[in-house]
Image (cartoon, rainbow, N blue to C red):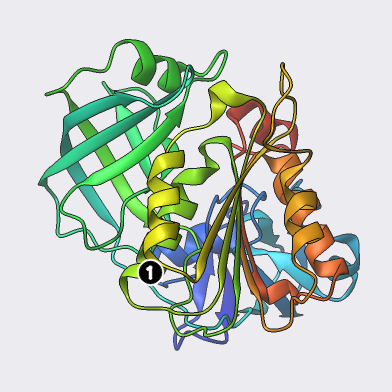
């Protein structure tokens, strides 16, 4: 027998079948529940448990800390009720919900950005119109392979879609995109998803920290912020291991030359040869430079270790958790490590 779960932001209770998560049931019944990875890694569906018996499947402690769990918070994507219950998602500023589209796209262009990152540009053939907020992601499937999550790197007002796909050892989809994908191929895209998007009404400083292909959503965020005329200081830090991992450097230096409120700083964490560039961990470089974080919003994307370290340090330095919008790029193996899909 299904349990009835009242979601305070929704008028109608959700029927949750035994073993089903609150998020899965809510989405299936048309509730626009905030969510991201759906696998206990991102924290986008963090909610408060007001009543009932709810069990959580394994999740990342980055997404939900022990202190938050003790305070009555849950992750809806990992929450299975064992009685009637009542929950409420955490209200976020500028909450935006776009319709989920299932689209057929065609590869319009391919560009080798680095030795292991390929830029894939798509034209939408059917299933649109596609609207999203800068910083969101989509589920992309090549040649019938299992869908994988990739962030849009283009501005939402662009005609097509741009993804930055890093080839991973053992990553079937990324290897296919790197070695077999051709111009003219059809690609299935579903989205948008994610809550780590640009808060367009925010007028305070912006700190954007990208690691590797995490530059994709950060590119979309920075370009959109500049394109809509935001004038607050924006600091973009791009962290990679070595010179060969840098890409789009000229693009961002040109943007910074055109927009005095943007500063761009590449950082190398493990250069193989002597360099005049900034070195070290990218989040430490950012917070060495920026001493006044009052009113700041931070956007972070890239490897989970970097994202978690940057988020923790920002919070330690006084940035409110709700002002830290983080998108950790978990591999399928990392998702599996916390018992996810």
Please indicate whether residue 249 sits to the left or right of residue 51 in the image.
Answer: left
Please indicate whether residue 337 sits to the left or right of residue 15 in the image.
Answer: right
Give the x, y percent position of residue 252: 43, 49
Q: Quadrant of the N terminus?
A: bottom right
Number of numbered discs visible in the structure rendering: 1
- The residue pinned by badge 1 equals 226
Please indicate whether residue 69 sits to the left or right of residue 214 in the image.
Answer: right
Foreground residue among 268 and 323: 268
Residue at the image point whose x is 74% and y is 21% from the top: 274
Q: Is residue 64 visible?
A: no
Give the x, y percent position of residue 98: 32, 68
> In the displayed structure, would residue 295 be above or below residue 226?
below
Residue at the image point whose x is 14% and y is 51% from the top: 127
Q: Is residue 118 visible?
A: yes
Foreground residue among 17 and 149: 149
> In the displayed structure, would residue 318 be above or below residue 78?
below
Give the x, y percent position of residue 156: 28, 61
Foreground residue among 6 and 307: 307
Residue at the image point whose x is 38% and y is 42% from the top: 139
Give the x, y percent position of residue 264: 55, 53
């Amino acid at each position: 027998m299904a349990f009835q779960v009242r979601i305070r932001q929704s008028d109608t209770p959700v029927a949750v079948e035994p073993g089903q998560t609150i998020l899965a049931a809510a989405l299936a019944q048309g509730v626009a529940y905030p969510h991201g990875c759906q696998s206990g890694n991102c924290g986008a569906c963090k909610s408060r448990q007001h009543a009932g018996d709810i069990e959580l499947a394994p999740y990342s402690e980055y997404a939900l800390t022990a202190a938050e769990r003790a305070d009555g918070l849950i992750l809806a994507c990992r929450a299975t009720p064992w009685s009637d219950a009542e929950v409420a998602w955490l209200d976020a500023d500028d909450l935006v919900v776009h319709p989920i589209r299932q689209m057929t796209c065609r590869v319009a262009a391919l560009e080798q950005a680095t030795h292991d990152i390929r830029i894939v540009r798509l034209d939408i053939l059917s299933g649109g119109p596609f609207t999203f907020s800068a910083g969101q992601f989509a589920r992309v499937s090549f040649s019938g392979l299992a869908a994988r999550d990739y962030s849009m790197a283009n501005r939402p007002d662009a005609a097509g879609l741009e993804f930055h796909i890093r080839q991973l050892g053992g990553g079937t989809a990324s290897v296919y995109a790197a070695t077999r994908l051709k111009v003219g191929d059809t690609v299935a895209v579903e989205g948008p998803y994610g809550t780590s998007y640009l808060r367009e009404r925010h007028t305070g400083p912006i700190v954007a920290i990208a690691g590797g292909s995490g530059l994709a959503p950060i590119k979309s965020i920075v370009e959109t912020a500049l394109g809509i005329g935001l004038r607050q200081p924006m600091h973009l830090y791009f962290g990679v291991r070595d010179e060969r991992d840098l890409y789009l450097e000229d693009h961002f230096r040109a943007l910074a030359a055109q927009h005095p409120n943007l500063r761009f700083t590449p950082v190398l964490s493990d250069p193989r040869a002597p360099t005049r560039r900034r070195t070290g961990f990218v989040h430490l470089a950012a917070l060495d430079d920026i001493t006044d974080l009052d009113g700041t919003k931070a956007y972070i994307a890239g490897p989970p270790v970097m994202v978690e370290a940057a988020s923790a340090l920002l919070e330690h330095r006084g940035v409110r958790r709700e002002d830290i919008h983080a998108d950790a790029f978990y591999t399928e193996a990392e998702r599996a490590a916390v018992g996810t899909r």
